[in-house]
Amino acid sequence: MTDAGNQFAVICALSAVGAAAGCLLAVVRFVETSLGLRAITRFLSEFVVTTGCGALLWLVVLRMCAGEVRLFFVFPTAVFGTVLFICISKALIPLVPRAKEAAKRFSDSHKDGFIARHILK
């Protein structure tokens, strides 16, 4: 892997995997905070995100680097994942009260068949 173009492509792909992981983990945190889900649900969703991004990471390493694992590969993935997780989490914080209110309105509208009686007549 001495070609500079190939190295740049690998770093870009690993950064994209880290960015996807950070975004998805921030969304999982927002949904869990807004809906007040159980801890096991949050664990399972974070496990699925981490496993999927880990599989993508290995796919990038196997396909683009012929299976050569280097310690540097962890750096761009971790940096982009962490930065995007923090930024998106900070951006979603003001939306939490409105999302909780919308979830409450949604659950209240399904009580006693409100939608079936009044809206779907």
Image (cartoon, rainbow, N blue to C red):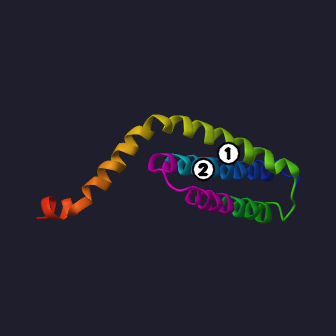
Highlighted magenta segment, given as a residue range: 31-52
The amino acid pointed to by label 1 is Gly
Residue, x 76% and y 53% (percent of image)?
10
Which is the main secondary structure of the residues drawn in magenta? helix
The reply, left or right, for residue 104 in relation to residue 31 is: left
CA neighbours of label 2 inside 10 A, class few (<14), some (14 to 19), many (20+): many
Q: Which amino acid, mark 2?
A: Leu
Which is closer to the viewer, label 1 or label 2? 2
Q: Does residue 19 belong to the magenta stretch?
A: no
Residue at the disc numbered 1: 81
- The one of 24 and 34 positioned closer to us in this rendering: 34
Tell me the SS state at disc 1. helix
Residue at screen point 22% across, 62% down: 112
Q: Nearer the viewer, residue 68 or 34?
A: 34
Decide whether residue 38 is among the magenta residues. Answer: yes
Q: Quadrant of the N terminus?
A: bottom right
Label 1 neighbourhood size at 10 Å, few (<14), some (14-19), many (20+)? many
Image quarter in which the C terminus is found: bottom left
Please tell me whether residue 97 is drawn above or below residue 109 in the rendered image.
Answer: above
The residue nearer to you, when weighing 42 against 51, is: 42
Question: Circles 1 and 2: CB distance less than 8 Å?
Answer: yes
Residue at 86% over, 58% down = 69
In percent of width and height, residue 65 lies at: 82, 60
Name the one closer to the observer, 20 or 101: 101
Residue 116 as seen in the image, left or right of residue 73 = left
Q: Tell me residue 108's x, y (percent).
A: 28, 53
Residue that extends furthest to the left in the rendered view of this protein: 121
Residue hosting label 2: 25
Q: Label 1 to label 2, Cα distance in Å?
A: 9 Å
Instruction: Report whether 42 appears left or right of 53.
Output: left
Give SS at disc 2.
helix
